């Protein structure tokens, strides 16, 4: 079930060779819409997913969040991507075994080589149809070439007011996050 991208640097799989997008100097990448990479994962929470309190184990949810973000980021970049930072992972309420967990991910921001992906986790109680928002997260993913070096991603084409708002908020989070890790001089736009 879990995709593996916990790979040490410079040990990238041979399969990644040839996935690199080669750009000539001065050539620009076509922008891609948020819609083009939107990703959804839905699973039924099974007893094997539970913690010792009888609810869904947080690590299971974190894995699903990372997978959905990975799918959205790689659909945007069409290159291998890794998670570099998880920001604001929030669990709002416990998830019951037997609920359907739906994880929706969309790219909020694309920089030069990084993307911020926003993720929303919802549950559906199958007996009643009740849907609840149970968690959210923002993940920063970086596209890598076959050598494991950050490589450019397409710009994000913003179509709706919502796209513009999410992009602005992602830029603000990026500025705060880079300052936290001592990269204050780096701005959201390069
Ligand atoms: C991803 C990785 C290659 C980036 O290396 P780096 O030396 O920071 O590379 P760069 O300085 O070129 O930064 C690449 C991009 O990531 C962004 N970035 C780097 N660290 C970041 C952080 N902590 N938070 C947010 N963005 C970050 C940079 O701003 C840059 O974005 P931009 O190109 O859009 O402007 C490196 O950190 C790595 O290999 N990490 C391990 C990833 C991994 O294995 N993840 C799996 C889970 S453990």
Image: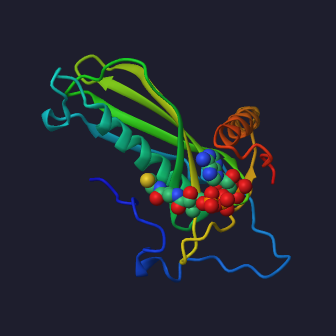
Q: Residue at x 59, y 77 (%)?
A: 20
From the viewer's perspective, is residue 22 above or below residue 39?
Answer: below
Q: Residue at x 71, y 39 (%)?
A: 179
Q: Residue furthest front?
A: 182
Taking the image as shown, residue 121 lies to the left or right of residue 84, namely left
Camera-side residue of 134 and 142: 142
Coloration mode: rainbow
138 relative to 33 in the view: left or right: left
Q: Would you identify the image quadrant in which residue 131 lies?
A: top left
Q: Is residue 14 above or below residue 59?
A: below
The answer to whether 128 is drawn above or below residue 86 in the figure is above
x and y percentages locating residue 144 in the rendered image: 57, 68
Q: Name the residue rendered at 54%, 45% in the picture.
A: 85
In this view, the residue in front, 125 or 119, is 119
Residue plotted at (34% across, 36% down): 61
Count all numbered tags in the image, as a single digit.
Answer: 0
Asked if one can make out residue 161 in the rendered structure from this viewpoint, the answer is yes
The spot of residue 78 in percent (x, y) is: 57, 66
Q: Can you tell which quarter of the image residue 53 is in?
A: top left
Q: Quick check: 62 above or below 154?
A: above
The quadrant of the image that shows the C terminus is bottom right
Query: Ligand 1 is in which quadrant of the figure?
Result: bottom right
Residue 74 seen: no
**Residue 42: percent from the left, percent from the top?**
34, 40
Residue 41's x, y, as percent?
39, 44
Residue 171 is drawn in which quadrant?
Answer: top right
Position of residue 144 in the picture relative to residue 11 (left or right)? right
């Amino acid at each position: 079930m879990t995709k593996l991208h916990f790979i040490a640097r410079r040990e990238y799989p041979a399969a990644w060779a040839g996935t690199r997008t080669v750009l000539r100097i001065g050539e620009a990448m076509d922008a891609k819409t948020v819609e083009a990479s939107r990703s959804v994962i839905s699973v039924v929470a099974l007893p094997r997913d539970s913690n010792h309190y009888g609810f869904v184990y947080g690590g299971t949810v974190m894995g699903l969040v990372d997978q959905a973000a990975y799918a959205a980021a790689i659909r945007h970049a069409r290159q291998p991507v890794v998670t570099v930072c998880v920001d604001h992972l929030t669990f709002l309420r416990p998830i019951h075994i037997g609920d359907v967990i739906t994880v929706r991910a969309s790219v909020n921001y694309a920089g030069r080589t990084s993307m911020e992906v926003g993720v929303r986790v919802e549950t559906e109680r199958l007996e009643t149809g009740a849907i609840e928002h149970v968690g959210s997260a923002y993940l920063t993913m970086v596209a890598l070439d076959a050598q494991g070096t950050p490589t450019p991603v397409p710009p994000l084409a913003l179509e709706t007011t919502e796209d513009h708002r999410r992009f602005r908020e992602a830029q603000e989070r990026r500025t705060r996050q880079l300052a936290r890790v001592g990269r204050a001089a780096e701005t959201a736009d390069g």
